[in-house]
Image: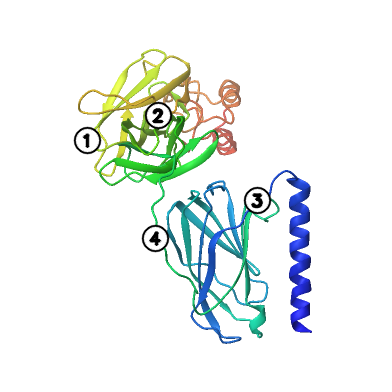
Amino acid sequence: MRKLTKNIIVGVTLFIAFFVFSADKASAAVQGLNFPRDTINTGNPEAYAQHLIKFGLPLESLQVSAGDYILIDFPFYSSLTEPTFLSGSFTGNPVFSVIDKRIRITGIELLPGKTLQINGINAYNPANRDEYDVYIRISSDPDGIVTRNMAQIIATPTDNSVSVSATIMANVGTLKVTGYAAPGLFLTFSENGTIIGTTTGTPTGTFSQIFPGINPVQHTIIIFGTDSVNRTTSPVTIEAFTRVRELTIVSGVLMPPTMSIDKDQITQGESLTISGMGVPGHMIIIYTQPAPDESYQTAPELDGAWSHTITDTSSFEIGVHSVWAIDQDIFGGQSLYSRTLDFRVTQALPPNPGPPCDIEKGDLSCDLLVNIVDFSILLYYWGTNNGVADINADGSVNLIDFSVMMFYWQG
């Protein structure tokens, strides 16, 4: 009866999944996976076992992109844990999550023909050996409604496989992109709106990214970077034609600096600090516009951080100004502009004049009398911080000043 119940549950689940898939993608077909298997360290019922899951993506399949999901369902297991790490021919930064009896993996790239190994999943085995089923799906959505690849496997203590080595010359090429970027800058590569790879700037300010198995066509790849405080570079576009079974190298890409400002509004004469991340050993050149339309230079620290303060902005016109920066190497080569930021310059307030005489007894008109003339001056500056009416010099013209004036009132 338990075996029949399991088959009914699994059958209904698969029927619903395929029904929804067929309704959304009537013209597409679900493909399998190459040599899927799940090896566990113990096959004893109800034992706590560790799973090692392997599979390959068929050559005719779509690649797994960072926005896709690998879903692994354990319908009859319990106390499921996240994987500890991935291994194999993938790129990206995997993100793991557990939803009841499902493992969800996203954030990685896996090309057709490549393999993936998922390590460190733990769970309690089912009570019956005929319920050791595991289901793997690759989907473009987090719930697995639109499934592209699927496999059903049985977890076993051995992988029951035979290794065969072969070399197949595929009609694809390889692209390598190298260049300079701020240390720790997280670089994202995209083509036709799809993320195709990510990497991080090295501590010395370089980066390198390889795209194996890339189609032999003209490629337009957009690169942008994000630093540790979420400031982004402006995008850089590269063009490359890759040839069949050849390595194409695009080198010398210089990423723009990231940039931020400490204030988006200043008064004339007030300082403005511009900071960001750039390549160590290079020079950051900062521009402002409109007049004075000057440039300023600063050098990044060893960790790539740079900062420059415009100490006197009294020559800046009233209104909206723009500021941007470029990264320049030792040979004079320059990056594209950073992102442009705007700030507003307002007119400086006149200095707060002090009282023309001793007003501590309420004589604001300095005529040696405390009368209606002084009261009128007090009312005029009421609620301000103007020193000509701030009798007790507490920074505010208020009821306390009025009380002092009334104490010395002469009428």
Given the image, on which type of amino acid does mark 4 rest? Ser
* 365 up-or-down from 6: above or below: above
* 197 up-or-down from 347: above or below: below
Image quadrant where residue 137 sits? bottom right
Name the residue tied to disc 3.
Answer: 141
Residue 358, can we see it?
Answer: yes
What residue is rendered at 78% in x and 79% in y? 4
CA neighbours of label 2 inside 10 A, class few (<14), some (14 to 19), many (20+): some
Name the residue tied to disc 1.
Answer: 281
Given the image, on which type of amino acid does mark 1 rest? Gly
What residue is rendered at 36% in x and 35% in y? 275
- Residue 142 location (% of width, % of height): 64, 54
Q: Nearer the viewer, mark 2 or mark 1?
A: 2
Front-most of residues 237 and 361: 237
The numbered mark, 2 or 1, whose residue comes first in the sequence reads: 2
Name the residue tied to disc 4.
Answer: 165
Image quadrant where residue 127 sits? bottom right
What residue is rendered at 55% in x and 47% in y? 60
Given the image, on which type of amino acid does mark 3 rest? Asp
Q: How many marks?
A: 4
* 150 up-or-down from 127: above or below: above
Q: CA distance from mark 4 to mark 1?
A: 47 Å
Q: Is residue 44 left or right of residue 249?
A: right
Q: Nearer the viewer, mark 4 or mark 1?
A: 4
CA neighbours of label 3 inside 10 A, class few (<14), some (14 to 19), many (20+): some
Q: Secondary structure at mark 1?
A: loop
Tag on residue 240? Answer: 2
Front-most of residues 175 and 193: 175
